[in-house]
Amino acid sequence: MSTTELQVQATDAQELIHLLPSPFTNTQPAPELLTQGAEALVYKTHFLTPAQPAILKFRPSKAYRHPTLDARLTKQRVLAEARVLVKLSAPDVRDAGVHVPGVLALEWDVARKVKNTGAEVERYRKEAQGAVSGAWILMEFVEGSSVKDLLRGVDGYVKGRAGSGNAVNAEEMVVIEQEVKGLLRRIGRAVGALHSKGGVVHGDLTSSNVMVRPYRKDHGLVNGDGDAHGEAEEDRCPNLSGDVVLIDFGLATQSTQDEDRAVDLYVLERAFGSTHPKQEGWFDAEVLKHQDGYKGSFKGSNVVVKRLEEVRMRGRKRSMIG
Amino acid sequence: MVEKIQIAHIPDDLPIYVACYKDVQNASFLKQQLLAGNQVYNYAFVDATTILSRQHLLAAAFRALNDHIHDRLKSNNVHSEIVVCLSSNNNIGDAFRRFGIQDSTKDLVIVKVGLSPEFASESVEGHLKDAIEGTPVPFDDAFLRQTCDLDKLRKTYKLGKPQQGKTVMNGNGGHATDERSDIEVQVLGLMALRGAT
């Protein structure tokens, strides 16, 4: 790595520290920024000890909004997400096939009522001044990789083999296709369980918001070694086995309406089609209509799939206003 | 047997000291001291039957310390706040009845926050040795596994009944999980959500 690169990284790191809420300005080692969305910054950090990885999702307050409105909106969103995650982490929901990261800690109010400041606290207050205000959720870190990366890994593997003159033969191809189809069904089943047992619609289902977490080794269910998992190495096909874990419930709502469920599927279908054109043709048969997919996951699934056809015709928005 | 713990994200000058005792004989005396507001007994005395794991207690301590740093304690001081933070509702008295020391308490977890630098494991240990009539044990999951009353905990946090003898294997080899880790993830979530409206 060249020196200029190192310098760039160093300044980046310094800037990022300024975008952390208190108390994470104290954190050693500093949280590492993973992604950034329109509303939130996502860091990898740890919980009570550095050995316990965790995800910090931070919604900074927005300077262009009126402070009172900003505090209220940020609070509502962060709390909605946390409530959904806590609701879905109940064992009966998990046993139905919904896996989500658990909530570890939470901060919802930018300007939570503060008592008259004592001198002792003033000391920490000053230290915290570099921090940005906002709301945050600290949640469990999910091992493994996103479905997006896994499917890209599969494509890369097939392509790489073809390029190196050792193309995947028909037999191997069938095996790979079966693996991928199996994963798609598991996704359908997980979404079905989320809708029925969880009573929640995700609101932003995409292949990067669905993760596959390898089974833990102590259960003896990992075939081969887990480190091949999800890496886009071209000499090995990614291992697709594991629990399907849904992440990013920032747009989730608690709803049991067929319309909302159908829209949820529609969003996934569209996102999936544009991210994975090669596998797009399998989506309907595997994720939705397969007995091990969405369709077989709960009693009312037929109605939802039927409703989806309507949604496809007109798009995501029901009314033409707003 | 006092363990000094530095919770991540909390400034270095706010360590906590945790000790555990079993077969405590003078629980009612300790409770009296708390009620009387005796500053010498300014500790968080937690009934060990309500603590699931190290993580459970330390998560409460994390929230209490974080609220302390930001000067928004709900209760009197950071020690009582640790007990409050174990609860899933905002009622302070209720939290003390459920998680705090009772006259009948035999197993005890004690937390002291190192608010000023003169605290050290030795000084805390010295005082506790005189104050607690009981057998010191290490603060670890093995001890808490023995003492924790899962049914009571489930009732306290209003969790559903466990599905007896039904290990659900869903489709592609989902694995049986530990009942305690199931409870823990829910309990931590409920503790974090306390006070949200």
Image (cartoon, coloured by chain):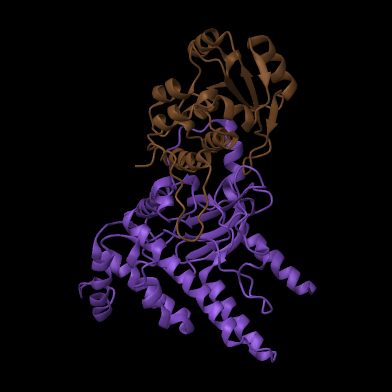
Chain colours: A purple, B brown
- Residue at (67, 47) in percent of width and height: A51
User: Relative to the observer, which residue lies in front, B180 or A211?
Assistant: B180
Residue B56: x and y in percent read 54, 35
Q: Is residue B74 visible?
A: no
- Residue at (69, 92) in percent of width and height: A165
Residue A211: x and y in percent read 51, 64
Residue B148: x and y in percent read 53, 27
- Residue at (25, 77) in percent of width and height: A309
Q: Quadrant of residue A155?
A: bottom right
Most extreme residue toward the front, as rendered? Answer: A171
Q: Is residue A299 visible?
A: yes
User: Relative to the observer, which residue lies in front, B48 or A6?
Assistant: B48
Name the image quarter holding the N terminus of chain A: bottom right
Residue A322: x and y in percent read 24, 71
- Residue at (59, 76) in percent of width and height: A153
Q: Quadrant of residue A55?
A: bottom right
Image side of residue A30 versus residue A146, left or right: right
> Is A102 above or below relative to A119?
below
Image side of residue A296 versus residue B106, left or right: left
User: Relative to the observer, which residue lies in front, A268 or B178?
Assistant: B178
